[in-house]
Image: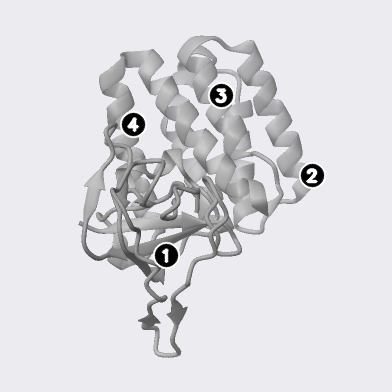
Amino acid sequence: MVLYKVLNANGCSCHGGSLKWSLPVKNENGSWTPGEWMPEIEGPLVECENGYHLATLEQLTQWLNERIFIAEVDGEIVESSDKGKWVARKVRLVRETEWDERTARLFACDCAEHVLYLYERDYPDDNRPRHAIEVARRYANGEATVQELTAAWAAAAGAARAAAGDAAGAARAARDAAGDAAWDAAWAAAGDAAWDAAWAARDAAGDAAWAAEREWQAAKLAEYLTEDDRGKRVSLEPNFNSEGEAS
């Protein structure tokens, strides 16, 4: 099983604590030199208390942040009681994926667009959400300005306020995809768009649709990681040191 760790731009934990991780280094020939093994955790592994927290690709969208690394574990590893993450005793990061500002924004657009039919079914003459997605995608590719993105976000937000039910969820996903232009919000826009898209699917067709949407999102996210990562798994979440402090 392949697991991942998500960190902030500085290579530190970002979902509880601020542990500085030893990062892998990319070599001139394209290979990677892994980071050093993090200090081995002592005592029983306890979710949210003691251990390095990792997650699979299927769990990733609820923990998105700025950088995603492939992690290697050694020794004991246990799954959390809610099956939302894994807890490991010894971890190192072996290489970084291609996740960045651009891929985060494009992923947000994909999630919003996937459920856009729910909005357009009820509001066939309102193109504000679709336009927001188009502008957000162009912005990610350096083809639209911050001003254009801000205007598209405002228009999609207006559409979300005017809609109801699953249609509103689809419009919110479009708004999220065209979220804050600042780099440090790109990953947040991706997470919000994925979340709202999943809720829109659930509102439209129930829990099975929610699960199906999350599965689709995981497969789509894999396309934005390096080619070797496709179909594998991913991480995030707080880590904790042997004193139980968030790391």
Query: In the image, what residue occupies the spot 40% across and 67% down?
Result: 39
- Label 4 SS: helix
Q: Nearer the viewer, mark 4 or mark 1?
A: 1
Q: Is 53 left, or right, of 136 in this rendering?
A: left
Q: Nearer the viewer, mark 2 or mark 4?
A: 4
Residue 176 percent location from the top left of the image: 59, 34
Label 2 sits on residue:
147
- Label 3 SS: helix
In the rendered view, tell whether residue 100 sits above or below residue 50: below
Instruction: Please name the amino acid that badge 4 sits on.
Output: Glu
Residue 85: quarter of image: top left
Label 4 sits on residue:
213
Q: Nearer the viewer, mark 2 or mark 1?
A: 1
Q: Which one is nearer the viewer's eye here, 244 or 28?
A: 244
Instruction: Please name the amino acid that badge 3 sits on.
Output: Ala
Instruction: Please name the amino acid that badge 1 sits on.
Output: Thr
In the rendered view, tell whether residue 160 sits above or below residue 145: above
Kindly tell me whether residue 56 is visible in this rendering: no
Q: Which callout, 2 or 4, points at the residue further toward the start of the chain?
A: 2
Label 1 sits on residue:
97
Q: Is 222 left, or right, of 179 in this rendering?
A: left
In the rendered view, tell whether residue 208 sits above or below residue 212: above
Give the Cα distance between marks 3 and 4: 16 Å
Q: Which one is nearer the viewer's eye here, 235 or 175?
A: 235
Label 3 sits on residue:
171
Q: Nearer the viewer, mark 1 or mark 3?
A: 1
Q: Report crowding for label 1: few under 14, some 14 to 19, many 20 or more residues within 10 A (C-alpha).
A: some
Question: Which image quarter is the N terminus in?
Answer: bottom left
